[in-house]
Image (cartoon, rainbow, N blue to C red):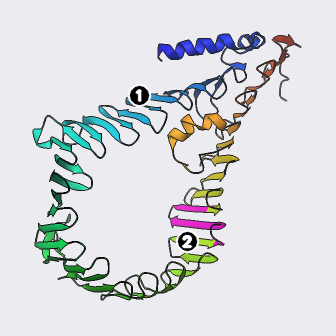
């Protein structure tokens, strides 16, 4: 732990009311002085936690993972056993992540520095100032690249392309994706494309065409399969499109679209015809998926029958389901229900008024274990793990919108969680905290502890007896526990 953290902890201890110091003699492992300073055992995992200055400082060691924070400014987390660490400064403004030799520093999603040992064995270092500067350096000089937009650059495996080269962009650029190479002039107006059996051109938005002949390829099972060809063209984009897909395969498809009057796609497995595309009347007959569908002003009015069933009259009512999924709503967004059945997972989520209220249940149908999360914005957030452990937090201002964001929980939840309640189903331990430990209660199989008003009133009982302290003065004597009959 850094020297700064140790100095801060000492200062917090000196700042607590002297009347709370009697708690240290009563329980050397814990300390209760309300929002000023408190040290206590974790409820849901092994380890200890310290909190001080209300919501503005905490430190904890949870099963070998060390974490300290000054919410909402800074948080650092370390797991020495696996050589993993991370920190955030004014999240999401600045963040740093490291796992072994791999690291990444990021500033406001614009500047990033990253590097480490890659799969190929070369140690790479990347610098990105999006969207102006891109750089990578590696002992393998074939992996090096530099790009300064818009003047000149070369990139590899960036921006969804295998390779990018440009000079005075958008005057000229060349991109490669798999075997397709595209030369752009005055991007996106003029381009020429070529690849394995394909050629294409466009003068956007006036006209464009692309052709690819059927080719053969060997799959992972060493089987030779046909990679279907196609012919595509457009004129006066986005008003006219014509295409032939899957050429040379058993499921060729033809498609023509004249916006906004008509669109039709025909193939052996599926037919779709739209009048007034994209918001008119649609007729879909899918023989491969075994369903038929009729839409009017899609997605407002939909009816489907077969392998999937849909009845929708937006925003009043909708019910859609197939063998795996179900989605319903009434008076959207007042009530929304979704279900996923992918054995052994059975997941159900009910929402009211968008994110105002959300109830998610995940059931393992093999062993019967069930996890649940309930968010009622901004009042509370409730979690029950599959082992039965529970946690309740009030208030919850951001958690319902970012349910799986660790940084929100670590750096912001502490600020507004005026009430916390935890229960460990495995050990039976429970704890409750109000206003950052102004009131705190802990209970385990061996003891009970209660602290109130900066530790001015404290009560503790163990198997040997109990003791009450007011302003640090003990009242009563410990009494031996009565033997069980």
Q: Is 459 or 3 nearer to us in this picture?
A: 3
Q: Which residues are magenta?
A: 330-349
**Residue 188 is drawn in which quadrant?**
bottom left
Could you tell me what secondary structure mostly forms the magenta stretch? strand
- First in sequence: mark 1 or mark 2? 1
Q: Is residue 255 above or below residue 362?
A: below
Image coordinates of residue 381 in percent, x first then y, are: 66, 47
Q: Residue at x 59, y 25 (%)?
A: 57
Q: Residue at x 15, y 62 (%)?
A: 185
Taking 361 as reference, is 255 left or right? left
Taking 29 as reference, is 471 left or right? right
For mark 2, give the secondary structure.
strand
Q: Residue at x 27, y 53 (%)?
A: 159
Q: Is residue 319 above or below residue 221?
A: below
Image coordinates of residue 416 in percent, x first then y, are: 66, 37
Can you identify the residue that label 1 sits on?
Answer: 81
Q: Is 230 or 368 nearer to us in this picture?
A: 230
Q: Is residue 430 above or below residue 303?
A: above
Can you identify the residue that label 2 sits on?
Answer: 326
**Residue 438 is drawn in which quadrant?**
top right
| Quadrant (top left/top right/bottom left/bottom right) for the C terminus | top right
Image coordinates of residue 235 in percent, x first then y, are: 24, 81
Q: Residues within 10 Å of mark 2 (few under 14, many from 20)?
A: some
For mark 1, give the secondary structure.
helix
Mark 1 or mark 2, whichever is nearer to me = 2
- On whether residue 343 falls in the magenta region, the answer is yes
Q: Residues within 10 Å of mark 1 (few under 14, many from 20)?
A: few
- On whether residue 304 falls in the magenta region, the answer is no
């Amino acid at each position: 732990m850094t020297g700064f953290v140790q100095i801060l902890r000492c200062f917090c201890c000196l700042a607590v009311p002297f009347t709370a110091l009697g708690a240290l003699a009563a329980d050397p492992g814990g300390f209760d002085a309300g929002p000023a300073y408190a040290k206590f055992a974790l409820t849901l995992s092994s380890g200890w936690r310290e909190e001080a200055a209300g919501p503005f400082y905490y430190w904890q060691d949870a099963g070998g993972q060390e974490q300290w924070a000054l919410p909402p400014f800074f948080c650092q987390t370390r797991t020495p056993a696996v050589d993993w660490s991370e920190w955030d400064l004014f999240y999401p403004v600045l963040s740093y992540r490291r796992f072994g030799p791999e690291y990444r520093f990021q500033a406001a999603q614009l500047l990033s520095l990253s590097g480490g040992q890659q799969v190929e064995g070369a140690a790479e270092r990347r610098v990105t100032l999006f969207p102006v500067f891109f750089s990578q350096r590696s002992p393998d000089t074939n992996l090096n690249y530099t790009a300064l937009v818009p003047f000149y650059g070369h990139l590899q495996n960036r921006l969804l392309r295998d390779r990018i080269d440009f000079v005075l962009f958008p005057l000229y650029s060349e991109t490669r994706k798999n075997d397709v190479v595209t030369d752009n002039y005055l991007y996106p107006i003029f381009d020429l494309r070529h690849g394995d059996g394909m050629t294409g051109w466009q003068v956007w938005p006036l006209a464009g065409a692309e052709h690819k002949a059927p080719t053969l390829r060997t799959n992972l099972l060493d089987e030779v399969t046909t990679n279907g060809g196609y012919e595509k063209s457009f004129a006066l984009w986005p008003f006219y499109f014509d295409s032939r897909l899957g050429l040379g395969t058993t499921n060729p498809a033809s498609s023509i679209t004249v916006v906004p009057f008509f669109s039709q796609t025909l193939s052996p497995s599926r037919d779709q015809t739209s009048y007034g595309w994209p918001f008119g009347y649609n007729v879909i007959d899918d023989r491969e998926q075994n369903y038929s569908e009729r839409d009017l002003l899609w997605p407002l009015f939909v009816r489907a029958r077969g392998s999937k069933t849909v009845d929708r009259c937006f925003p009043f009512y909708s019910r859609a389901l197939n063998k795996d999924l179900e989605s319903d709503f009434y008076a959207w967004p007042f009530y929304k229900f979704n279900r996923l059945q992918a054995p052994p997972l059975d997941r159900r989520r009910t929402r009211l008024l968008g994110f105002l209220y959300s109830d998610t249940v995940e059931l393992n149908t093999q062993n019967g274990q069930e996890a649940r999360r309930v968010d009622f914005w901004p009042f509370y957030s409730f979690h029950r793990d599959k082992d039965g452990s529970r946690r309740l937090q009030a208030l919850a201002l951001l958690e319902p919108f970012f349910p799986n964001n660790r940084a929100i929980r670590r750096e912001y939840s502490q600020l507004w969680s005026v009430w916390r309640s935890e229960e460990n189903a495995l050990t039976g331990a429970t704890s409750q905290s109000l206003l950052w430990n102004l009131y705190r209660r802990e209970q385990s199989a061996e003891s009970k502890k209660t602290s109130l008003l900066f530790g001015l009133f404290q009560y503790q009982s163990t198997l040997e007896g109990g003791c009450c302290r007011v302003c640090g003065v003990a009242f009563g004597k410990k009494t031996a526990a009565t033997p069980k009959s």
